[in-house]
Amino acid sequence: LKSFNSADQIQPYDFGEAFATREAIWGIHSIKDLMLEVNDVKNQFQQIQNKINEIENNTDTMRESFNSNLRVLQSNIERIGGSSSSNMSELVSRISTLESRINNLGSSSSSSSGGGVSVDEYNEKN
């Protein structure tokens, strides 16, 4: 008997074709299960992306509503108070500042979500 002195001496045992076939089928089932999991994750990602888009749309709508209300308020103040008083110009200035802050808030929220990858971009890559 030769003594064992390296891993190269290990020879695999052949369990037969039935075992090899069963191993291949297990591998196929594993791949199928992984594909289903990937598809589930993809669907969840799509749902999250849809919610993000819905939130962005609601934020834009709310911002537009605020701006519209501010313009109506400014118009009413100008109509009632006249545009010559110093108090009037201060109110108009404050309303304009508020309007620009609301616009900046909306643009910063949409740019903060822009760092991700859209579902279409993800699908194209994969």
Image (cartoon, rainbow, N blue to C red):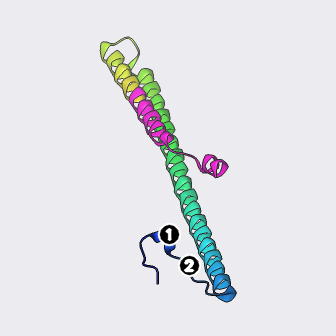
Write down the region rendered in magenta. Answer: 100-126
Residue 56: image x %, image y %? Answer: 51, 45
> Residue 8 shows which numbered tag?
1
**Residue at x 66% of width, y 87% of height:** 16
Observer-side mark, 1 or 2, equals: 1
Residue 12, compared with residue 81, is above or below; it is: below
Give residue 78's quadrant in the image.
top left
Decide: few, some or many residues near mark 2? Use Cα within 10 Å; few <14, some 14-19, many ≥20: few
User: Looking at this view, is 119 or 68 the one in front?
Assistant: 119
Q: Where residue 86 appears, x then y in whole percent?
A: 31, 13
Q: Would you place residue 18 above or below residue 68 in this image?
A: below
Q: Residue 113: where, in percent of width, then height?
A: 47, 43
Please, what secondary structure does the residue beneath circle 1 have? Answer: helix
The image quadrant of residue 18 is: bottom right
Q: Residue 33 location, x and y as percent?
A: 59, 74
The CA span between labels 1 and 2 is 11 Å
Q: What residue does disc 2 label? A: 12
Query: Is-magenta flag for residue 17?
Result: no
> Is residue 121 in the magenta section?
yes
Marker disc for residue 76: none
Q: How many marks on residues?
A: 2
| Amino acid marked by disc 1 | Asp
Q: Residue furthest front?
A: 1
